[in-house]
Image (cartoon, rainbow, N blue to C red):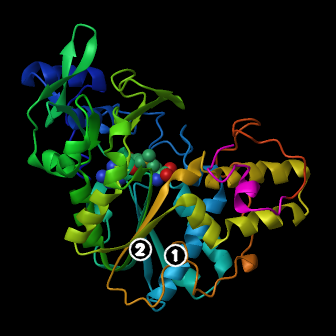
Amino acid sequence: MYFDPNSHPEPTADPERRINARIKSAGRITFAEFMEEALYGRGGYYTRPGGPGPINPGGDYFTSPSSHPSFGALIAVQLRDFWDLLGQPDPFDAVEFGSGDGTLGRDVVRYTQTLGKPFSTALRYTEVDRANSDGGATTPVGVTGCVLSNELLDAFPVHRFVIENGSVLELYVVAGEDGFAGAPGPVSDQEIEQRVAPFVSALPDGYRGEVNLGLRPWADRVAATLDRGFVLTVDYGEYGPELYRPGRSEGSLRAYYRHTLSQDPFRHVGDQDLTAHVDFSAVDSALSSAGLDSLGMTTQTAFLDRLGLRSYLARLPALGLPAGEVERNRMPMLWLARPDGLGRFKVAFHARGVAGTRAPIGLDNRGADHDPSTLPVPLLTRDDGHFDLADGAYPGTSWDGTVNTGTWAEILGVDDEGEE
Ligand SMILES: C[S@@+](CC[C@H](N)C(=O)[O-])C[C@H]1O[C@@H](n2cnc3c(N)ncnc32)[C@H](O)[C@@H]1O
């Protein structure tokens, strides 16, 4: 299934009809099969014409790379730091899995030019996305550098489970009179039970959750690609104990239809995005089995701050831009870091073959010789693939022109708990 662009030979472009046909012949399908068809089958959310996948640059969804070029710029700064930690190899490969419309790669490469040689000439950036017709055929193997991704793992098809009488049952998908519905049954794969086992005794009956079985194949793929270097994984999720706990009885599966959260994964099949939080404990263990060590995890807020976002924000008003342009850049920059915005994403670091004396800057900037005030401030340009939201699209966005030099929380416009 992984990276196989030919896994959907069915002639119809309607995922709903295809799912119905599968259920009719099999009686039920796993939720992962449902999600696979709804997102990646022909006519699915990521593969339909007009959808947000690589076939439609500038599509309709909203992620960190599409918010503002600062995100790609600071990823470039982190890549340069990885390159330093690896002893400045040439070439230095950055391989992005799940690159979507390619905005992150464009921003990284563009900003790298401003960082100067020899890093800019050493960097080789490769994009890999399963929705590209060449699929896995072009994925590099055995590189020195970094494998990175943003919102890849939360888009993998997941299996759903429910706790009944203290046991783990799988929630399959069946076709009822009112459309698709969940139906419990014995698990289709023992790994589902194994992954939930450490938490089961604390979970109440009726608890629903998800297990992402795509992590191991992904980790094997990462290990084949990366001979020596770092894995940088930006995604929405938690460590296992935080994800599988009684307060989260409805699980983390979310459906988004035209930017609006919808509770029902069975509606708008092929037209709505489906995501589930990433279990970062499972990420650690999958990568560990593949030979990569965890260095730690941080929030996107802290990651971007350590690399230089606060410095970009502080210098923005003094660049001589019209007030409207300052605001047009400031809002998405803040939104990248706000804990009630994209700042709550996690950034996980893994490595292999690196005899580091210090941590990467984005994880811990103590001990690094890093002065963000020397970095050029990246700015939105017109028609460059970023979102350019109309006024008011970001919450808490009125600005009186005063530069806030307070704490990081004050600069972001949130209190210390991350609330507005
Ligand atoms: C939520 S989108 C994120 C796109 C982009 N990284 C961004 O941040 O805007 C997830 C992307 O991952 C791709 N994808 C999903 N599963 C994949 C896999 N197994 N290998 C490579 N790409 C995959 C999808 O086609 C889609 O473009």
Q: Main secondary structure of the magenta part?
A: loop
Residue 146, labelled with which disc?
2
Of residue 253 and residue 391, the one placed in the foreground of this image is: 253
Of residue 176 and residue 239, the one placed in the foreground of this image is: 239
Which residue is drawn at the image coordinates 68% and 76% (left, top)?
A: 114
Image position of 349 with respect to 272: above or below? below
According to the image, label 1 marks what residue? Answer: 79
Q: CA distance from mark 2 to mark 1?
A: 7 Å
Q: Quadrant of residue 233?
A: bottom left
* Mark 2 Cβ and ligand 1 under 8 Å apart: no
Q: Residues within 10 Å of mark 2 (few under 14, many from 20)?
A: many
Task: Report helix, strand or loop for mark 2.
Answer: strand
Task: Give the left or right position of residue 43, taking residue 85 as reference.
Answer: left
Which residue is drawn at the image coordinates 24% and 63% (left, top)?
A: 286
Q: Amino acid at mark 2?
A: Cys
Q: Which residues are magenta?
A: 404-420
Q: Position of residue 167 (x, y in %)?
A: 13, 36
Q: Position of residue 164 (x, y in %)?
A: 16, 30
Confirm whether residue 133 shows in the render. no
Confirm whether residue 167 shows in the render. yes
Q: Position of residue 169 (x, y in %)?
A: 14, 34
Q: Amino acid at mark 1?
A: Leu
Q: Residues within 10 Å of mark 1 (few under 14, many from 20)?
A: many
Residue 363 part of the magenta segment: no
Tally the numbered discs. Answer: 2
Q: Are marks 2 and 1 in contact (CB under 8 Å)?
A: yes
Residue 408 part of the magenta segment: yes
Image position of 308 with respect to 89: above or below? above
